[in-house]
Amino acid sequence: MISFEEAHSFVLGSIETLRPVTRRIIDALGSVAAEEIVAHEAVPGFANSSMDGFAMRSSDTSHPPARLRVVATTLAGNAPAPRVDQSEAVRIMTGAALPAGADCVCRIEDVTVDDSRGEIVVSQVVAPGDCVRQPGEDIAVGDRLIAQGEVLNAPLLGVVASQGRDALLVYPRPRVGILSTGDELAGANVELGPGEIRDSNRPLLAGMLQASGFEVVDFGVARDDYDSTLALLEAAALTCDAVVSTGGVSVGDVDHVKTAILALGGSKARWMQVAIRPGKPFAFGVVGPRATPLFGLPGNPVSTRVSFELFVRPALRRLAGHRDLDRPRLRAVLDESMARSRDGKLHVVHVEVGVDRDARLRVERVARQGSHLLRGVAGANALVLLPDGAGAVVGESVSVLLLDELHVRETNS
């Protein structure tokens, strides 16, 4: 067996980031920027009102009440109103340019309007700059707005758009081919024959990939035949940025995936017995003219999920240009004991994690153990990485990989 660390390093050391492409801003959410973007336009580009009200000279309000003559009205998108002179005001809407001579805006609800005389009465002191958005207050020319390697969230896309751009250079989201293997796999909407089982792994893989921001290409099921397995893996590698298969990587007579990956990848491929539980058998190689990473995961569904989280997802994130590859690793206090025996392996245990009233992370529930018990891990939002030894007891701190931050919640502990 080899250690988890050795297998992890081998996989990530074999991955090169995809070549950048130009994407429309509207299609770039979650992608990684492949260029630095520096501001060439100030935002705001001119002084404008942050409220509906009246633009005026602050000095006119120094001894309230002040009676001011309304000389014009200006709307957002209009040219600035004429200059405001002493004892004058301009009716102004949110976003409209501040007229020359004015240095503040008084909110409409803070004035008394005398329509019969075309005047307003201001009963309070208005300070210079009140309700005014100053030029460059948000973005100044020369500001670095986005660094290369930064993940593009919705506000950043708006920042790019504020510079008059509709596209930018990003690392593409990998297109990932998926397939299951085994003559025992039956499709949906058919009765199971003797010895047959449902294929839950492809929907599982598709869901994990999509949740991580990757595109999925379904290549179906490879039967227990070496030539057809080899051909399907090779075809997927030619058209996708990565390929993930499940099953066929152990030591059985018809475990052809590992042999096919070794044949396709040559010196760039390895079949590994990794010292983790579950997920011990694992095959990986870089194959074909596109240098496509090809992952062979174990066929038991919980093992599939563990191998995906520990090896596949970090590798695909490197392919997509991400800097942070692994899930967040935190410490959590056990509310349940986690017994185990010494076997030389890192045990990877699905758990539910919550936050107590003292803002401490706690392991509230430990899922039933078994590489085939998929339903038992469906509610898990973290993985405990339990090193070799006797396990851990209630109150002890353990290392967890957080899978789903949205499910972290307050507990009664």
Image (cartoon, grey):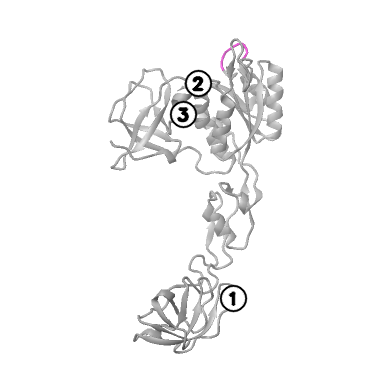
Residue 123 falls inside the magenta stretch = no
Position in image of residue 50 (x %, y %): 47, 70
Do tag 1 and tag 3 residues touch (Cβ < 8 Å)?
A: no
CA distance for labels 3 and 2 = 21 Å
Check disc 2 and report the residue beneath it.
280
Name the element at disc 1.
loop
Amino acid carrying mark 1 in the image: Asn
Q: Identify the residue shown where x is 56% and y is 46%.
A: 30
Looking at the image, tell me whether mark 1 or mark 2 is earlier in sequence order. 1
Q: Please name whichever residue, 198 or 295, is drawn nearer the observer in this view of the structure.
A: 198
Check disc 3 and report the residue beneath it.
378
Q: Give the range drawn in magenta.
A: 250-254
Check disc 1 and report the residue beneath it.
78
One can see residue 73 in this view = yes
Is 389 situated left or right of 120 in this image? left
Name the element at disc 2.
loop
